[in-house]
Structure formats: structure tokens, C-alpha cells
Image (spheres, helix red, strand yellow):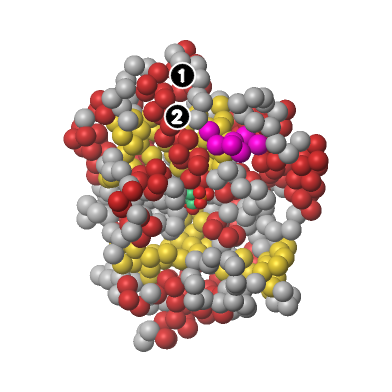
Amino acid sequence: MGKDTNVLNADFFREYPVISSGKGIYMYDENGVEYIDGASGPILCSLGHGLTEMGDVLKEQAVKLAFAHRDDCVTPILREACTKVCEFTNGDMEKVFFVCGGSEANEIAIKLVREYHLDRGNPGKYKIISRWQSYHGSSMGVLSISGFTKRRSGYEPYLSEFGHIPPAYCYRCWFGREAGKCNFECAQALENEILCQGPETVAAFIAEPISGMSLCGAEPPVGYFKKIREICDKYDVAFIMDEVMTGVGRTGKNFAYMHYGVVPDLVSMGKAVGGGYFPLGGVACTAKFYNEMYQNKGSFPPGYSWSGNPLGAAVTVKTFEYLAEHNLVDHVAKMGEYLKSKMQALSTHPTVGDVRGRGLMIGMEFVTNKETKEPFDPKVKLSLQLNREALKRHMLIESSSGCNRGQSGDQIMIGPAFIINKEQIDTIVDQLDQVITTVEKNNGF
Ligand code: PLP
């Protein structure tokens, strides 16, 4: 542990562990003390730490060609990276635009749908409808469409409001329905919102297929996304799947939209697309979507200086090769089922209200009363307590609060690297068990 001097930390008063190396799912501090990375950073380092081949790829590409500008030229490695992404979608997507993170990816997705509607002679269509309890990134455009009250808090004066609909959150259904026994009221809400906003003003709808940190693994009911797709088609509204957290294998399929039998018009990605070795994101679109732009204006000038850079492209190509060579997506599906069943077994704890998610992103929500689903008083900061107790035991987990309409509700997420094995999952869940027991005791349970 050590107090940082010139680093502007998230919490100015906290002593952070000083981590200097990593291997697989482990990280080590300066004194060699081992930490289990139970969440692969922010559900990001998909391939695990310390892979020599990833370092080699970066070095080789840096020496060969570290930078080339999208406005001036294209590189063979960028072509290869875009092809890899499209192949990974089994041909559902046709064109890819690379950026340097998930927020940038969603910013570009917004601009792409705007361009698409402009090109087709619909200049009135500009609104992006999204869901409450969602997260699409931290820059102002994508924070505007995010519905994560805690992360929007304080920045509201900079945010635009285009319309948010209720989340697909069966544990605390906003319509008071029971999971599997509803009429998809939360999907129907999209049609209502489009109509109230005026269909001629709505450009797109964006959603995470499985919720990230705002609802920690909440999944929509079966059939939800089919209904969403139908509504989008009916009103000429583009459908963006935000797969920044779920994409590139995290949920046990190549992309999470594949669980639901629908194909979105655009898929944004981030985190795992760089394996944890380079700041990367991207947006892919279907041939149908692209052709509309191609046949009309035929250009898309926006971008960032580092969009499509060769270093990121080289890392992407290697990431997809590594996933294939080690059959990691299937492995994630298997390990995910195991992790979920182990975490479900912790439901015997008096405070564990719900365990949810798919693949290697499994969330847990905590309550004071399982019958009434009463959340903890936010002053208790339960999710923070869980996070800090895990850290005391040298385990890093993700935690968040505000799942109960932004006001209360505590959750954690376990999302280790794809290379994890059963024994390591046992260790993580055993540790988690002890973490929960300690925190429960400290809070009078
Ligand atoms: N979209 C989702 C679903 C995310 O989970 C995140 C980050 O956690 C983002 C977008 C933003 O990505 P980034 O932090 O790489 O900008």
C-alpha cells in the first residue's frame, strides 16, 4: 500500500495497493503479495495478465508502423482486424470502425446513425432513446444516453435528454410483473416513447444485451429483444447493441446478441476486443445499414486522431487468434455456468437477494429482507464495504450502488479473465463467501 503523490486517484483519501505485475488471473504488488483479479479490472482483461505474445505483437507493430492516419491511408493490419471482427459476428456485420474505448465506440455509433438518417433524407431523426439503469460511457454524449443515475449525478447541466425507458430488470420489475409471466411491458415502453417523442424525430435505440455495472448482469426476459427489434423496424429506428462489456466472448457466445436470436444494426464493443492489452473499442454495422450510407452520401468523416491505429489493430488480430487457438468462448460458457452455480449457492446468506448474469459476468444484489427486497440504507455503503473487505483478503471485485432507481441498491460483479479454471473459481467464491459473512456480521446479520 502507498499514498500516491502525482496520481489523481478516484478516492483522494484512500491508500491504494501498488500493483506492479500480473500473471493470468493474479496481480502482484511491489512486495510480491498476490491479489486475485476477480473482475479482470472493470470486466476487461479478458485474456489474463502477462501474456508475452501480446507484448511481442505490440513491440513488432510499433517498430514496423506505430501510426497511420485514417484520413490519409489504410493499413493491412487494420483490414485484417476489421475482417476478424466481422468473421466473429458470423457475417452479421460488414464494416468496422475502430476507436480507443467503449465511450468513443458509442459516440461513433450515435454519429453513424445520425449520418444514416441524414443520408436517407430524414434530417428530423436525431434522438437516441435508451434505458434507465444503463451505462454507455463517460463522455458527455454517451453519458447523456446512459441511465446510470449515480454516474450522471453532478454532470446533468451538460447532458441532453432524448428519452429513457424502464430497464429490463426482472428482479425489481418496474411494472410489478413476475419474470416469465409478463407481456414485455418494458419492451412495449419503447413503442410508447417513440410515439410520444414523434417517430420522425427518433434515430436509434441503444441497449446493453446483458446489463453491466448499472444492474450487474440483469438479463431481459426471453423474447424481449425480438419485440424491441420489431418496434425499431416499424418506426425506422436503428438498433444499437452496446456490447462494450458483453462482447468478444464475455457471455459465452461471440457476442451477447447471439443469445437472443436478433441481429442489431450496429454493435459497439470495447474492453475484450483488445484482450486487456491496448485501449480499444469499435463499432460494427450490417451490410444493409452500410449500403444505405454508401448509396447516398458515401462518406463518414468523423473520428479521433487514434481511430484505427495499427497498434490497436495488431492487438485485436492477436486477441481473436488467441481466443480461437484456446477455444476460449466455449470455455467461458462452461466456466460461466460453473461460476453462476457456485455463486447461486451463496444465496443461503441472509442478504443475497439475487444472482444473475451469463458467462463470466455474474452479478449479485444484496437486500436487508429477501421477501420485500428491501435494499440497504445507502448510508451503509454496503457495496463499498464488500469491495473493501474483498481487497483486505487480496481479491479485486467490481461493485456498484443505485440499482434501485438510482437511489439505493447494492451489487457486486465477478468477471474474471476467460482463462480461469474451476479451482480458481472455487477460490474466488470461497473468498466471496467469507467476505459476505464478515460484512453481514459487521452490519448485524
Ligand atoms: N458501455 C458499457 C456497456 C460499458 O460497460 C462501458 C464501461 O464500463 C462503456 C460503455 C464505456 O467504456 P469505456 O470505459 O471503455 O469508455
Q: Are marks 1 and 2 in contact (CB under 8 Å)?
A: yes
Please tell me how many numbered marks the rendered image carries: 2
Which residue is pictured at 44% across the width and 13% down the height?
Answer: 296
Looking at the picture, does residue 288 appear above or below residue 15? above
Element under disc 2? helix
Quarter assignment of residue 213: bottom left
Q: Is residue 159 or residue 131 the one in the foreground?
A: 159
Where's the N terminus, which quadrant?
bottom right
Looking at the picture, does residue 400 appear above or below residue 220? below
Horizontal and vertical percent position of residue 321: 72, 40
Instruction: Name the residue type under label 2.
Output: Leu
Magenta span covers which residues? 303-309
Q: Which residue is mark 2?
A: 112
- Say whether disc 1 or disc 2 marks the residue closer to the N-terminus: 2
User: Is residue 13 a member of the stretch shown in magenta?
Assistant: no
Horizontal and vertical percent position of residue 348: 42, 75
Which residue is pictured at 31% across the width and 67% down the height?
Answer: 408
Which residue is pictured at 62% across the width and 55% down the height?
Answer: 45
Q: Which residue is mark 1?
A: 293
User: Label 1: how many residues lie within 10 Å, few (<14), some (14-19) or many (20+)?
Assistant: many
Which residue is pictured at 70% across the width and 41% down the height?
Answer: 311
Horizontal and vertical percent position of residue 277: 67, 50
The numbered mark at residue 304 is none
Element under disc 1? helix
Residue 217 relative to residue 193: left or right: right
Quarter assignment of residue 216: bottom left
Residue 307 relative to residue 259: left or right: right
